[in-house]
Amino acid sequence: MTEYLIRRVLQSVLVIFLITIVTFLLIHAAPGGPTQVMLSPGLSPEVFKQQAHNLGLDKPIYIQYIRWVGDLLQGDLGYTFKNHLAVSDLLLPRIGNTFILMGAAWLVSLIIAIPWGIYNSTKVYGLSDQSASFISYIGFAMPTFWFGILLQQWFSLKLDWFPLSDMHTRGKEGDIGDLFMHLVLPITVLALGFLVSYMKYARASMLEVLDQDYIRTARAKGVKERKVIFHHALRNALIPIITVLGMDLPILVGGAALTESVFNWPGMGRLYVQMATQREYSVLMAITIVTAVMVVLGNLLADILYAIVDPRVKLGKQGGKAA
């Protein structure tokens, strides 16, 4: 297992390295890239060359990349072009805010979806199953931003049950109760899509497992249905769900960006949208790297969870899963 984990970590580092190359090249090759943003407009050719030299923008692209990666490895994420603010000062507080929103939405969706999907697999086409299908149609069809605005109109402006936007009421920073009230609506928006997805996966996975021979044998031996579901079937049914969880991190980050923008949540996604409009490429690259690390770690964690959920799954020398 140790050998496999080391190999997976090395693969993850390679993936992140390749992402840094692609991100750097795409941003620097884009029209109106960093050179046009960093250098003042209307400069004479001589002054333009001098400023480019002072900023290192006249160096070959690979030299600029090596310098950027070197600074990145030392924790230096660079500075904004227009106001010369440290990117780390802008980004680090917002990462925590995004984790609060994403983590809470993910947890809520899992707590509701997995038990509901398991229950529906035992009551196929029942009232609960039909209701879940109806909610799924709504969840898959409804745009995130529109659903968020709809909730704001009803529950903030008309009913005045929850705050309209932001993370805290002014003067109540650090108040957990106030934070919870601000979380309800954005969590509802962000969790809906994942809830219906995980519920469908849980139901389908459980139905597939419940149709296996060993489940029929357990039932024929008189094993209680509760034990059949939770002891014999659940662990095997969770394997596909774990795969989906690892793959959903990029989607969750993208959904968080829209949700944060709608609810004015001071997180990483909203910062990305703001910096994209201002062409602050150093911030965009830093957020891209942070997101890439999150996705890679999520997939690595999913591999480890395979062995925890199902003892038959071994992280062996083949780097795969052997029953």
Image: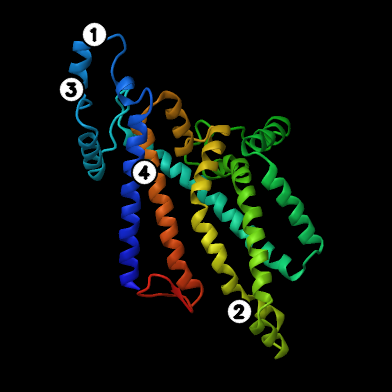
Vertical arrangement, residue 5 with respect to residue 96, above or below: below
Label 3 neighbour load within 10 Å: few <14, some 14-19, many 20+: few
Tell which circle, 1 or 4, labels the residue nearer the N-terminal end.
Answer: 1
Label 4: how many Cα within 10 Å (few below 14, some 14–19, many 20+): some
The amino acid sitting under disc 3 is His
- For discs 3 and 4, the disc positioned in front in the rendered view: 3
The residue sitting at 61% across, 79% down in the picture is 231
Query: Picture coordinates of residue 188 (x, y %)?
Result: 63, 45
Any mark on residue 289, and which?
Answer: 4
Q: How much space separates mark 1 and mark 4, taking CA atoms?
A: 35 Å
Image-based side of 1 in relation to 251, left or right: left
Mark 2, residue position: 231
Q: x and y percent of residue 311 in the render?
A: 48, 78
Helix, strand or loop at label 2? It is helix
Q: Which mark is residue 44?
A: 1
For the residue marked with disc 1, what is the amino acid?
Ser
| Quadrant including the N terminus | bottom left
Above or below, 293 against 265 in this view is below
User: Can the viewer see residue 90?
Assistant: no
Name which residue lies at 31% across and 27% down: 85
Disc number for residue 53: 3
Give the alpha-carbon distance from disc 3 to disc 4, as whole Å: 27 Å
- Mark 2: which amino acid? His
Number of marks drawn: 4
